[in-house]
Amino acid sequence: MINKYDAFIFDLDGTIYKGDRLIPNADVTINKLKELNKKIIFVSNKTTGSIEDYYNFLIGKKLKINKEEIINSTYVIKEFLKKYFNKCNFFSIGEKKFIEELSSDGFNYTEDTKAIEVVIVTLDRKLNYTKLEIAAKALENGAKFFAANIDNTCPVEEGEVLDAGSTISALEKRTHKNLENHFGKPSEFMLEEIKKRLNIENNNTLLIGDRLETDILMGNLLGVDTALVATGVTNFPNGNANIQPTYYLNSVFDLINSANKK
């Protein structure tokens, strides 16, 4: 497989690692691709860490990568906000790291429902009723309704936890307002950022991930081959019949070991 492709797009959570543990032989796989001078980027919807955090984690696991090879949805939404809502007042159902990253770029976090211009939803493992009501009232007052990602769950070592998709559904039902934009996989904003980093060609790029509705769909939208791995959040080989991967893999190690084409 590695001889067929010149570029590889990897999901992170559930594909390269799960929780704090590396998927077995993921380091071997990535380092082999780097040794062969393959182009690599990592794409994550997770916002509980910065790109610097993910880079330090991965190199700490002996992956020989560059920080510029990592994209997450925090970066993508920040670039959008800088262009269209620079220095705006925002409220986020999200964790401390996400709020700090936006605040460090000049965006003003507030819980004043009359001052909030943008509501942003992402993974929040300390979600509570108070946060939901602040967001709901801000939306009813005319705030924009954005999400850094729309995953329903996030993979952890023990299984899965609720993610942004569930919160978005709750707010839509509470306010009767629909999400306006999201910035993670498989959004148009993430697609454009990937295209900036890689010269995507249909016959030389492979995308590898553990989710049909985000990873594999994004690969289909990019027009590249895809591989679904069984190490994260997936019900493979069953799932959405309308979203089909090119390959089913046990793990990323199959890229340099063996693979079963669908």
Image: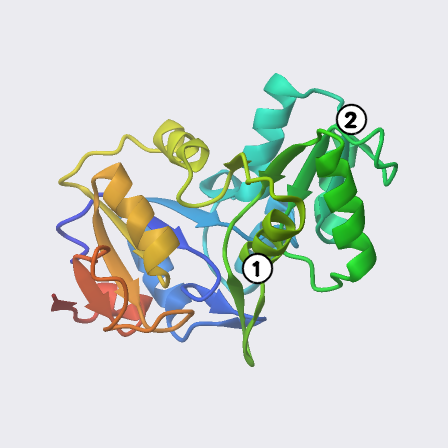
Q: Secondary structure at mark 2?
A: loop
Specify the quadrant that holds the N terminus.
bottom left
In the displayed structure image, the side of residue 22 where residue 102 appears, left or right:
right
Q: Secondary structure at mark 1?
A: helix
Q: In which quarter of the view is residue 56 placed?
A: bottom right
Specify the quadrant that holds the C terminus.
bottom left
- Residue located farthest toward the front when viewing the structure as drawn: 176
Identify which residue is drawn at 84% across, 28% down: 115
Residue labelled with disc 1: 166
Residue 73 against residue 164 in the figure, above or below: above
Residue 105 against residue 9 in the figure, above or below: above
Three-letter residue code for mark 2: Gly
Residue 55 on image: x %, y %: 57, 51
Residue 237 on image: x %, y %: 23, 73
State how far apart marks 1 and 2 are (Cα): 29 Å
Identify which residue is drawn at 37% across, 61% down: 211
Residue 237 against residue 118 in the figure, above or below: below
**Would you call the spot at circle 2 few (<14 residues within 10 Å), some (14-19), or many (20 or more)?**
few
Residue labelled with disc 2: 106
Residue 175 on image: x %, y %: 66, 45
